[in-house]
Amino acid sequence: MNDPAASADVPASIPLWRCGRRTITFRHVVDVQDLVAAHPDWSREALAAALCRAWDWRRDDGTLNRALCQTLVRRLAARGLVTLPRARRVPGRHRRPLVVAEPVVPLPADAVLRDVVVRPTAASDQARWRQLMEAHHYLGWTPRIGESIEYVATIGPHWVALIGWGGAAWKTAPRDQWIGWDAAVRERRLHLIANNTRFLILPQAAGRKNLASKVLGLTLQRLNADWQQRYHHPLLLVETFVDPARFSGTCYRATGWVPLGLTRGYARRETGYVAHGQPKQIFVRPLRPDARQHLAAPWPPPRPAPVGDPMPIFDVNRLPLDGAGGLMEALATVPDPRHRRGVRHPVRGLLTVAVAAVLAGARGFQAIAEFAAELAPDVLRRLGLPRGTPPSTKCFRLTLQRLDGDGFDRVLSAWLVRQQILTGHVVALDGKTLRGSATATTPAQHLLSAILPDLGVVVAQQAVSAKTNEIPCAAPLLAPLPLEGAVVTADALHTQAATARAIVVDSHADYVFTVKDNQPTLKEDIATLGLEAFPPSVLRRDQGARPDRDPRDLDQH
């Protein structure tokens, strides 16, 4: 696609408006215009798919976000900025014709509430779910756009209730005041709220006492897990709107929902908000006790860890980032590897945001930049980015790649150690070769790390020279760490007297080493001791210290 800077006086990077969580610039508009001019015979769906691939617009699960591109294309057409091909389907007639609802079959007399099961609908269930909702719900059924999940409640083979969830309302004053967020934070956190859009007790189960609250409670128990599995982000809060002229919301109150008041009686349309004169009662229910704090906090809540990712996820709002002893104070000593000319963002602010993003679950430069884009301008300024604008992916990538890795690692490891007392923890020595670090002229980089396995935190790390191995690097790596009261573990390579002596004598810690065939004499001695074996860093209470041996000398036992 062509660069619009050559054909227009408007800078391509100036933001025009927001579409979802994306900032639309003049470059996006020109890209759409060029694509429509180059392919006038394409459908609107094909145009949206091509734009998605060109811009790499993806959802949290990695799939192309075609719905967002289609929304953008329609908005551009509504503003007269692009002429779209004629729609190939008439709006409002794209749904399949719904057949007559199935006959009502009464539930067996022995059906009881404890047998209720709630599950998401399978592909084979969706047509029946929509038919029943269209036939029996006073609002009928309308297609959901964006994230949504439909559930069915059953007693044995019988369907008894249907419940649907979708995206939250864009704004509603009682809810926003209850949370305590502003418009900027709401825009970045709204996807963490789900709306109960439909709830239907089927005619065959009507009148069953406590059935509605039972179904609603079972749904809430699994909603967050199902949402994370499908859309790869958690839910913190759920909401619903109850028509007080029809219902009192008893089942919501019985399951812990909080009434917040009435809406103003407006509905959102593509052209804006239209008054319909039917205010609704707003109910909300937090899915975790600190939901309000996370929704209104300056830092986004922790992301769920990717499948198979051993790294822990931290709540950045609880970490000391600024002030005395904070992360910013520690990172102030890291030198800036960039040339002073043209620097837009101070290195301390870049590193603070990058470290916070990784601790919160970001994996990769793109994820770090997306994390920074979710921060409010005042938060970015507080963290050392005076412009108040998030750095780009390229800025993070180039800065971190040029950084002195060893120096940055020492500073960060020391700060992490200060946040975590090592007494009572296991510190594991582990060496790994970095995949992809080898070049045509240099071998792959090998690192020896000290790790807290229960937390997944690397507290120290050291490069191993190609002219040596891990053994002489162990003691210098552990020396700066406050290991008193900790237990150090290592594989058979580090079963060395000097390493054991450094751990016990110098660091006042204990160790658990592995003995294999590389230490045949020691292995034979342990086999001879049998069940009476004891760790050499601990004295046996029944025998006391032997004057002719030093229990800390591993080669003597």
Image: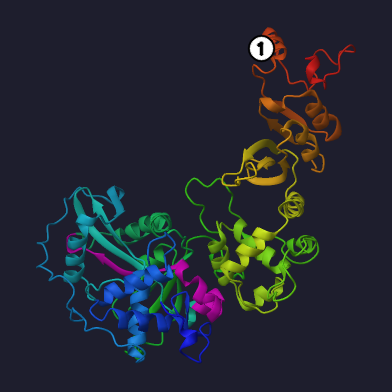
Judge whether residue 294 can be spotted in this image: no
Q: Say which residue appears at 64% left-offset and 16% top-offset.
A: 517
Image quadrant where residue 487 sits? top right
Vertical placement of residue 127 versus 516, above or below:
below
Horizontally, residue 400 falls left or right of residue 252, namely right
For this orientation, the residue located farthest to the front is 441
The 10 Å Cα crowd at callout 1, few under 14, some 14 to 19, many 20 or more, is: few
47 or 117: which is nearer to us?
47
Q: What element carries label 1?
A: helix
Is residue 444 located in the magenta-colored stretch of the structure?
A: no
What segment carries the magenta color? 176-204
Q: Where is residue 92 in the image (x, y as percent from the top left)?
A: 20, 80
Vertical placement of residue 425 versus 408, above or below:
above
Q: Position of residue 421 (x, y in %)?
A: 75, 46
Image quadrant where residue 520 sits? top right
429 or 285: which is nearer to us?
429
Q: Name the residue under label 1.
A: 531
Q: Say which residue appears at 40% left-offset and 59% top-offset.
A: 227
Judge whether residue 538 can be spotted in this image: yes
Q: Where is residue 216 in the image (x, y as percent from the top left)?
A: 35, 60
Q: Say which residue appears at 43% left-offset and 76% top-offset.
A: 20
